[in-house]
Image (cartoon, rainbow, N blue to C red):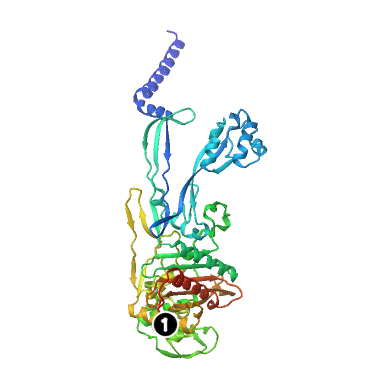
Amino acid sequence: MDARLKIVLIISFIFFSSVFVKLFGVQILQHAKYLEEARGQQVAKKEITPDRGKIYVKEGNELYPLATNLTLYSLSIVPSQVSDKEEAAEKLAPLLQKEKDEIFEKINNDKLYLPPIATGLDEEKAEKIKNLKLQGVYLAEEKIRSYSEGEAFAHILGFVNKEGEGQYGLEGYYNGELKGEKGVMFGEKDLKGRIIYLQGKQNSIAGADLILTIDRTIQWKAYKTIKDAVEKFKAVSGSVIIMDPNTGAITAMANYPSYEPNKYNEIKQENYSIFQNPSIAKLYEPGSVFKVITMAIGVDTEKITKDTSEYFDASVKIGGWTIWTWDKKPHGKQTMTQVLETSNNVGAVWVAQKVEKGPFYNYLKKFGFGSVLGIDLEKEASSPLKAGKKWRDVDLATISFGQGISVTPLEMIAATAAIANGGKLYRPYVVSEIQSPDGKKEEISPKEISQVITPATASTVANMMVSVVEKGHGKSAKVSGFKVAGKTGTAQVPKKDGAGYEENKTIGSFVGFAPAENPRFVMLVKLDEPQGVEWAESTAAPVFGELADWLLRSYWKVAPTE
């Protein structure tokens, strides 16, 4: 046989053998794999988005919705499929509240795709557009979150982003519970990927509903009052927290400025800090309101009583530092109650020195400072406390009157609540009940974190705080007919580089509770950098007094105790 013929036959044999092996592998060995791929090309899967859980407040026996879900529609047009573009533009214009020429200009081409030319269409408009039966015009559902109370509740609620994930506030903290579980349906699809024959379905599970501790009326009153105060004093910002001292339940938490959660996407990136809740995320040096904590520590360690007296000069030297009284004048011989009444820095330093660094640090930890309290809102912050054994003498001194320590408004009000309720630190919380779609209810119970001070200490310090309102710098927080316990604080603002404090910038605050002998509420008012007024007794204290008067006399109608 000719050698060339043999080579051709050998090559042909090898070729057909390889083809056979390949076909055998595809048709026999990999039959299941390719069958599954073929089915995949014929079967479509579509996720079923669950209804997000709603957020409510209680009003009597009724539930009032703060966050709900709306189904709206977006309208898209495929120009290449529109046979009469003039007609389509003319019919759509009045429904979309647009000019006919504007629509015509967009669709007068043969493009295969255009971004939606209208979004946020309600059910009524969508139905009218469907009835037009225009070729190439398509409506798509879009689920959106709707917030009924706008700016007043924004920092409590947060918002849901375009991906359906909760951000900030309750939406962020309870995102897992609120968003539910997705379902899926699958079946045969047509050339456009649409399911034409349903083969199976796994239903979605709706998210759980939340019921809050917030009182809607009090929240609105607090928001309006702090907004008015910020504008009146030309302050940078302001916050009010009102809490039940006996449970930790938050009654109101209002901040100004705020934002519109229904339009969160209009906030520019450089302004995203507006989304953070200043009441739980903004650290500040509290100033003289912190002296109530210093006095509580002094009394509980039995280093002082309310009547312990000492002579106090205009200043005290700590190492190379000189600490002055607020008015740079000697306050003379004073009891500890008078030290609190006159907000004497030198007196507060004296108490802290009596207690010493280690015990003072341990009490601050017990009061909840230096770690998050665990409130059920996303983005709670805290500044870790440097261990007491690492403190310099001047650290102990400045912390005693609220400088050189950073806290959040939430930490400050929770610690004050422990004085109001007999010495117990409670975890603050906003959700009172979680209701699952299957009808199960989970009630959130108050959680005691620790017994910080004795009931006797708490009662003593509360009486000292009443004296501050009656005789000291807190007079503008008085409420006729009631004993009010409170303390003012005017704090300096640290420079951003940490080198000292800003000139002519202060933070005014007031923290207190009433009725002092059986408190219905504890409240913190804070105003950042008010203009034209130096002391908190003229800014934060009157705001506290206005809200306390309204709560006790007008809203709750509490019988006077005095």
On the image, which quarter does residue 186 sit in? top left
Going 42% across and 65% down the picture, which residue do you hit?
Answer: 250
Residue at image x 60%, y 41%? 96
SS for tag 1?
helix
What's the residue at 60%, 30% (across, down)?
82
Amino acid type at circle 1 is Met
Q: Residue at x 51, y 67 (%)?
A: 239
Residue marked by disc 1: 464
* Most foreground residue, 279 or 473: 473
Q: Can you give x and y, in whole percent of width and height, for residue 116 in the image?
A: 57, 40
User: 72 or 366, which lies in front?
Assistant: 72
Location of residue 535 in the rendering, given as x and y in whole percent from the top left corner: 55, 78
Q: Is residue 375 visible to the viewer in this orientation of the structure?
A: yes
Q: Is residue 422 left or right of residue 489?
A: left
Q: Which residue lies most toward the top here?
A: 1
In the displayed structure, would residue 45 be above or below residue 352? above
Q: Position of residue 456 (x, y in %)?
A: 33, 80
Can residue 496 be seen here? no
Residue 338: image quadrant is: bottom left
Of the pair 381 and 353, the residue shown nearer to us: 381
Image position of 119 with respect to 539: above or below: above
Q: Position of residue 556 (x, y in %)?
A: 42, 69
Left or right of residue 124, residue 102 in this image: right
Q: Nearer the viewer, residue 313 or 122?
A: 122
Name the quarter where the C terminus is drawn.
bottom left
- Image quarter hosting the N terminus: top left
